[in-house]
Image (tube, rainbow, N blue to C red):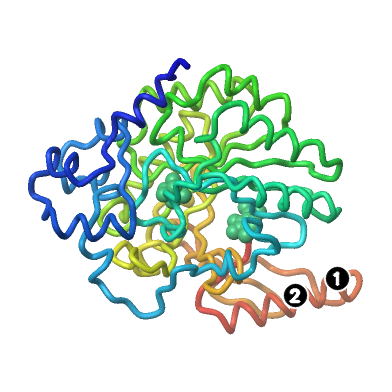
Amino acid sequence: MNVEEWQKLLIDGVHRVRELKQKFPHLDEEEIEHIISIYPVRINKYYLGLIRSPDDPIARQVLPDPAEIYEMSQGVREDPLNEEADAVVPGLTHRYPDRVLFYVNHQCPIYCRYCTRKRKIGDPNSVNHDNIRAGLEYIREHQEIRDVVLSGGDPLMLKDELLGDIVGQVRSIPHVEVIRIGTRIPSTLPQRVTQKMCDTLKKHHPIFIMAHFSHPRELTPEAKRSCEMLADNGFPLMNQTVLLKGINDDPETLKELFVGLLRFRVRPYYLYQADLTTGAAHFRTSLETGLAVMEGLRGHTSGLAVPYYVIDAPGGGGKIPMLPEYVLQVDEEQVVVRNYERKTFRYTLPPASQANGTSQEEEHHTLLASASSSSTNSSPK
Ligand SMILES: *Cc1c(COP(=O)(O)O)cnc(C)c1O
Ligand code: SF4
């Protein structure tokens, strides 16, 4: 069987203590052995090539760190988002009314040290066909599901045939309108995006690719080629980034990333506050850090480059948007707002008597209540 380029890059990557020690002599062998017996390591050869020094923002995403096992932090959990506890069948989380998250494997092109599902990834029993069958059946039986997010692991780590088979089965369900694929492939193993892969998937459009870039140094010519190929084949591309301490937690770095992604035809979609994951607490930032990033984007650059900054609520509350405070004051007559330059503006509201119907009035009161009770305004943009 012929091995494709991307498969060779995986095989030739770093997986074991010996290889790690060779490339990064400063690491403590015994310590690393202990860490990776709990959380496996994988740095494929392409991503390894992006590392310039052991403490750069690329290396920090993939090199095991003693903080993963020694740093104790309050409130961390192995399953911080209750993805498993809330699973309706193993591998399928149905949290929102019309969409589901469907895990199809546990393999990734690299293993991110900050991963929310770090307890699960790297499982050698990569694909559980019984779970996939049960998940498909659940979706088939629930007509309200119109959006299926394929995740893992990384679905694009599956070989074309199995990938096409799973996506084709989802597509054959009449009430499923949109399919999304959450993937770290374009940023960490772009060679995986081949014309054959695109041909396999494009039969089942609309398929959105939810990419995951963390740092502007991942914006390489190879990554660009993979995004362009996906766009040329009709896949709308979105990006999700986790806000990571010491890696991308400053406004300039993220602005460079988000503006750069637009050049790749990728739309920044979510910026996540890091989850309360066991073994990943050392990546967490303050909320102010994220709000400062958002403040530095809105108005200062293309609105297209501005993602939603969200907290995925612990325990399964879903994604909740966080925004800098733009509403300064609101009463019956007017709303006082400020813009990106911190200039103040008044917007006169229509008289309550003019509002047609009670629903608008109710909305108005809800706005009043939320503006006065919350310090973080969270209305959708
Ligand atoms: C993020 C997520 C989705 C998709 O959410 P959108 O806001 O529609 O992008 C669906 N289900 C679960 C469980 C999720 O975590
Ligand atoms: S690619 Fe995604 S699922 Fe895999 S380790 Fe990274 S964050 Fe976790």
CA gap, disc 1 and disc 2: 9 Å
Q: Residue at x 83, y 56 (%)?
A: 142
**Residue 364 in view (yes/no):** yes
Q: Residue furthest right?
A: 357
19 w.r.t. 231: above or below: below
* Mark 1 in CB contact with mark 2 (< 8 angstroms): yes
Q: Residue at x 33, y 57 (%)?
A: 39
Q: What's the amino acid at mark 1?
A: Ala
- State whether label 2 is within 8 Å of ligand 1: no
Q: Residue at x 36, y 57 (%)?
A: 114
Q: Which residue was labeled with disc 2?
A: 364
The answer to whether residue 184 is left or right of residue 84 is: left
Q: Which mark is nearer the camera, 1 or 2?
A: 2
Quarter occupied by residue 191: top left
The answer to whether residue 119 is left or right of residue 304 is: left
Quarter occupied by residue 341: bottom left
Q: What's the amino acid at mark 2?
A: His
Q: Residue 157 placed where, x, y %?
A: 50, 35
182 w.r.t. 231: above or below: below
Q: Quick one: 118 or 306, which is closer to the camera?
A: 118
Q: Residue at x 28, y 64 (%)?
A: 68
Q: Residue furthest left?
A: 26
